[in-house]
Amino acid sequence: MDKNFWKNKYQTQSTGWDLGTISTPLKEYIDQLKDKELKILIPGAGNAYEIEYLWNAGFKNIYALDISEEPLLNLKERCPEIPSDQLICEDFFNLNPSLKFDLIIEQTFFCALNPSLRKQYAVQMQRLLKDGGKLSGLLFIFPLTESGPPFGGSKEEYLNYFTPYFTVKTMESCNNSIPPRDGNELFFILEKK
């Protein structure tokens, strides 16, 4: 699942995960954020509806990261005022850890990665966050299979990956998922140790 894999997904419009808008749990989470100066990253941003929503809500220090240029161009077309240097076309694991963020929002990226990369994901997230920074968002909770993406997992598995690097503030089943995802999403807030 390299850059060409994802480029092909966007070019052929094989993006069944794409809701066409921000998901309800992330919208409600963002709505309660007060500090508009937060430096926020959304990795594996896809069409980045969350970035668009944040921008329109007054957050200007926001960064979309995707391995494929196509979804970033889609965002730029919808929101031309977002600075191009805040749209990063790069492999998440190659992102310079000197770019420190206050908040990283997870929205289906983790479950799109090969499960063999999950520990590496947790380590990179910890590196990219400022001291006391938070990783928040959604994870899928359904049995882990070899076919994907998306790849599922369980709360217990996720805790094993994250607890060495983060303090778990919240990790619970979503009560506000959209109907097709109802019962399959876990909302979490983790704080860098």
Image (tube, rainbow, N blue to C red):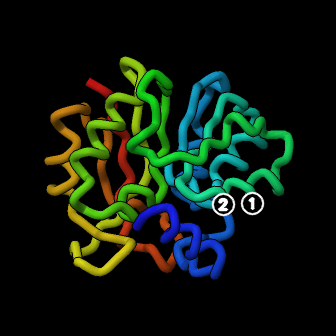
On screen, residue 37 above or below 50: above
> For the residue labelled by badge 2, is the local secondary structure a helix, a strand or a loop?
helix
Q: Label 2: few (<14), some or many (≥20) within 10 Å? A: many
Pointer 1 residue: 74
Badge 1 amino acid: Asn
Quadrant placement of the N terminus: bottom left
- Residue appearing at x 72%, y 49% in the figure: 52
Q: Which mark is residue 112?
A: none
> Horizontally, is 183 left or right of 101 in the view?
left
Q: Height in image: 184 above or below 14?
A: above
Residue 131 placement (x, y as % from top left): 37, 18
User: Residue 173, how many percent across, how many down?
Assistant: 33, 60
* Residue closer to the observer: 122 or 190: 122
| 10 left or right, relative to 154 | right
Residue under the image location 27 percent in, 73 percent down: 142
Residue at mark 1 to residue at mark 2: CA–CA distance? 5 Å
Using residue 22 as the reference point, say whether residue 122 is left or right of it: left
- Which residue is denoted by mark 2 in the rendering? 71
- The residue lying toward the viewer, choosing from 6 and 164, is 6
Q: Is residue 180 above or below residue 45?
A: below
Q: Are marks 1 and 2 in contact (CB under 8 Å)?
A: yes
Q: Quadrant of residue 150?
A: bottom left
**Image quarter hosting the C terminus:** top left
Residue at the (40%, 38%) spot, across then down = 135
* Residue at image coords 51%, 77%: 179
Answer few, some or many: residues within 10 Å of disc 1's Cα (few below 14, many 20 plus, some between 14 and 19).
Answer: some
Residue type marked 2: Pro
- Percent x, y of residue 87: 66, 42
Where disc 1 sits, the SS reads: helix
| Percent x, y of residue 128 | 41, 30
- Location of residue 56 by image quarter: top right
Lateral position of residue 147 relative to residue 2, left or right = left
